[in-house]
């Protein structure tokens, strides 16, 4: 087992890794930018190293600085968390060259699955159902028009690298394709450094279903069931839950088996997520794989009792998975609300100092956060403040616990999306499990009522 791990990240995910490492008896090193000097991950790590100015390109994305920090502190391994360098094959390769273990998949797998066009081909070869689409990147308007005509409109243009909705455009008519192709290519180049895009058939109002997997270096791969991530705004997830309210045990076993076989086919190791769209007829189609820990991994931990971060560390250290597929049982239901520092009406960023902060406990409540009174939510990084999760014997109880938890949460000094989550939880379609990625398009965003400790409108 490792003696010391460097965490190449910040905020709540850095704290999450620190917690797992402490329970395993492993020392941790936190890196931080000048803007994060007083953040909690700096306080609770065993050692700390400043790696640069506030801009992420000069700090959290600075591979030489991160490797230097690991070497001078004598780290055995680096955990990248999610975001930033978590899907960087380059970082994984540099780690190998420096004899530092990268806690994640191999550079080869990261490159393969990170290129969505190549990943589609690999999954198709492995027998995974995929959406009809272009065979590789589309590099001209003529090629794009031909592919779209063959698929039939509407189609969707996607960046071959990256995610989060950037480099993505829905096209409904031939007249719109050229401008959408140019815009998506520019966005992909700016966001990911690679302008390659591809085209898929667009599914109207699908569900977004993803499967969590774990694979060790001894050929063992398991899935931990599915998550429903259909509540999204501009392709950014707002609420996730496990299991999906519509997935049957038969579907879980069938698609889970396909995912496990596909992961074995590409020699996948460590944690990963295979993402699918489910159409209104219940058909599922592979869209991409994320070669890292997901933001929403906590809901899977709540319903399975498996600590995914600990398993990541054990796998990277060369240990076998401590359980088999037959040992995994889905118990109850869990829901996560991503609380962002954003205006609940306009969704404009709301960075600043949190003046007062209080979150409730109680049965079935888990809150992953870096926030506390007098802490600063920086304008330089992602707006996520906290992940509020609840677990219940069934989905109804999980929703009830989430509602009372949000009601009792106090965040003052900045605005947050808590009022939006509270309204979603009251929607009849959400309560009934009638979900799709078009949910927020139908969801009329009205100005929330004044008052209430969770509105977080002060300051």
Image (tube, grey):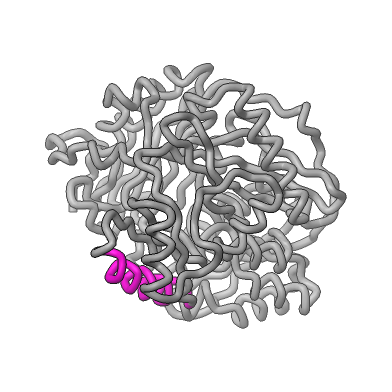
Q: Picture coordinates of residue 445 (x, y %)?
A: 18, 41
Q: Work out whether residue 424 or residue 401 is closer to the camera in this orientation and state it.
A: 424
Residue at 54%, 29% in the rendered image: 243
State the residue at coordinates (71%, 45%). Answer: 214
Q: Nearer the viewer, residue 253 or 318?
A: 253
Question: Which quadrant, please, contains the C terminus?
Answer: bottom left
Q: From the viewer's perspective, is 390 left or right of 175?
A: right
Estimate the x, y position of residue 147 in percent, counting from the top left.
43, 62
Which residues lie in the magenta part?
Answer: 176-193
Q: Position of residue 435 (x, y in %)?
A: 37, 31
Above-or-below relation of 19 to 239: below
For the point 35% across and 41% down, which residue is it?
204
In the displayed structure image, the side of residue 85 where residue 192 appears, left or right: left
- Looking at the rendered image, the quarter that the N terminus falls into is bottom right
Count the marks: how many? 0
Residue 199 lies within the magenta run = no
Camera sees residue 316 = yes
Q: Nearer the viewer, residue 175 or 51?
A: 175
- The answer to whether any part of residue 42 appears in the image is no
- Is 200 placed above or below 38 here? above
Q: Quadrant of residue 142?
A: bottom left
In front here: 369 or 271? Answer: 271
Q: Is residue 77 left or right of residue 459?
A: right
Q: Can you give x and y, in whole percent of width and height, for residue 31 in the image?
A: 57, 69
The part of the image, by quadrant, that contains residue 172 is: bottom left
Farthest-out residue, right? 218
Q: Is residue 187 magenta?
A: yes
Name above or below for residue 158 compared with residue 333.
below
Q: Residue at the location (74% across, 39% down)?
A: 222
Q: Is residue 196 left or right of residue 379?
A: right
Q: Main secondary structure of the magenta part?
A: helix
């Amino acid at each position: 087992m490792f003696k010391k791990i460097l965490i190449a990240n910040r905020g709540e995910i850095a704290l999450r890794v620190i917690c797992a490492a402490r329970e395993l008896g492993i020392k941790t090193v936190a890196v931080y930018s000048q803007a994060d000097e007083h953040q909690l991950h700096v306080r609770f790590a065993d050692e700390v190293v400043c790696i640069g100015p506030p801009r992420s390109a000069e700090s959290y994305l600075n591979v030489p600085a991160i490797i230097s920090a690991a070497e001078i502190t004598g780290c055995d391994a680096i955990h990248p968390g999610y975001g930033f360098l978590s899907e960087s094959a380059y970082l994984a390769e540099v780690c190998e060259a420096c004899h530092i273990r990268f806690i994640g998949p191999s550079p080869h797998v990261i490159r393969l699955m990170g290129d969505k066009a190549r990943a589609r081909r690999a999954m198709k070869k492995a027998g995974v159902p995929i959406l009809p689409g272009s065979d590789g990147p589309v590099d001209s308007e003529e090629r794009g028009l031909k592919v779209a005509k063959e698929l039939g409109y509407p189609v969707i243009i996607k960046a071959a690298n990256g995610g989060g909705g950037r480099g993505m455009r829905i096209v409904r008519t031939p007249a719109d394709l050229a401008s959408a192709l140019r815009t998506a290519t520019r966005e992909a180049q700016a966001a990911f450094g690679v302008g390659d895009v591809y085209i898929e058939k667009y599914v109207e109002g699908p569900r977004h279903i993803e499967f969590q997997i774990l694979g060790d270096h001894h050929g063992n791969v398991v899935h931990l069931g599915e998550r429903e991530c259909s509540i999204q705004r501009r392709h950014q997830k707002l609420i996730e839950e496990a299991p999906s309210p519509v997935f049957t045990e038969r579907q879980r076993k069938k698609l889970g088996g396909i995912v496990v076989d596909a992961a074995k086919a590409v020699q996948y190791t460590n944690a990963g997520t295979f993402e699918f769209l489910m159409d209104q007829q219940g058909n599922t189609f592979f869209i991409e794989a994320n070669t890292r820990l997901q933001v929403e991994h906590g809901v899977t931990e709540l319903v399975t009792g498996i600590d995914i971060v600990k398993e990541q560390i054990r796998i990277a250290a060369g240990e076998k998975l401590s359980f088999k597929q037959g040992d995994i049982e889905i118990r109850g239901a869990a829901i996560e609300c991503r609380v962002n520092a954003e205006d609940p009406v306009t969704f404009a960023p709301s960075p600043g100092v949190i003046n007062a902060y209080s979150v409730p406990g109680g049965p079935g409540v888990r809150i992953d956060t870096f926030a506390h009174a007098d802490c600063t939510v920086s304008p330089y990084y992602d707006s996520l403040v906290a992940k509020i999760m609840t677990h219940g014997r069934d989905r109804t109880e999980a929703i009830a616990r989430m509602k009372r938890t949000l009601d009792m949460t106090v965040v003052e000094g900045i605005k947050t999306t808590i009022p939006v989550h509270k309204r979603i939880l009251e929607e009849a379609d959400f309560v009934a499990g009638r979900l799709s990625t078009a949910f927020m398009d139908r969801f009329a965003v009205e100005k929330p009522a004044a008052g209430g400790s969770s509105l977080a409108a002060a300051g």
